[in-house]
């Protein structure tokens, strides 16, 4: 079993959207979700916060419900148990490695891991849409989706 942990700041926008998008992509490729476990967490998450209303709205456009999502803080245990940790920014990556230095070889930004051959030509960060319009969330979700598809091409 492979465990993938997706990390952002509050676990109410980027990593929560990435989690459900990746689960949907795996399901569409008939990958058993018992073989690949996908979770998400936040570096500054408050336990139990709901996904932002904009994230919920945008995920509905993908045919996915984020209504039941509740935020989870990043923990040492989650970092240690994950086989692959994909962060939304370089700062999130530094934070995770700062907590568990021995995890360094399994922590990447999503863009860095999914598209390593092009990583010098663009920012490795996925911009935080928190507090912005649905259009900004939609753009963020589309960007995440592009890199998740590239991730699956690489992993499968």
Image (tube, rainbow, N blue to C red):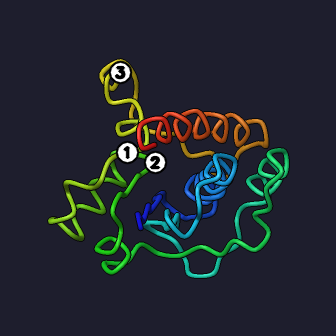
Indicate the secondary structure of the residue bearing disc 3.
Answer: helix
The image shows residue 10 at horizontal and vertical percentages of 54, 64
- Tell whether label 1 touches label 2 (CB within 8 Å): yes
- Looking at the image, which residue is at 63% across and 39% down? 140
In the rendered image of this protein, does residue 74 appear above or below residue 126? below
Relative to 100, 31 lies left or right: right
Residue occupied by mark 1: 109
- The residue furthest left is 102
Relative to 58, 31 lies left or right: left
Q: Quadrant of residue 133?
A: top right
Q: Quadrant of residue 81?
A: bottom left
Q: CA distance from mark 1 to mark 3?
A: 13 Å
Numbered tag placed on residue 118 in the rendering = 3
- The residue furthest top is 121
- Looking at the image, which residue is at 45% across and 59% down? 7
Mark in front: 3 vs 2: 3
């Amino acid at each position: 079993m492979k465990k993938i942990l997706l990390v952002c700041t509050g676990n109410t926008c980027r990593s929560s959207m990435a989690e459900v998008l990746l689960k949907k992509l795996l399901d569409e490729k008939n990958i058993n979700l018992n073989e690949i476990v996908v979770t998400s967490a936040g570096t500054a998450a408050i336990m139990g916060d709901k996904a932002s209303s904009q994230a919920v709205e945008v995920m509905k456009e993908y045919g996915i419900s984020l209504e039941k999502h509740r935020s989870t803080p990043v923990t040492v245990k989650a970092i240690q148990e994950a086989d692959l940790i994909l962060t939304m920014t370089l700062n999130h990556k530094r934070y995770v490695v700062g907590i568990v230095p021995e995890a360094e070889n399994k922590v990447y930004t999503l863009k860095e891991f999914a598209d390593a051959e092009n990583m010098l030509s663009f920012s490795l960060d996925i911009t935080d849409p928190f507090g912005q319009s649905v259009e900004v969330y939609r753009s963020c979700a589309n960007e995440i989706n592009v890199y998740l598809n590239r991730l699956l091409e690489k992993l499968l």
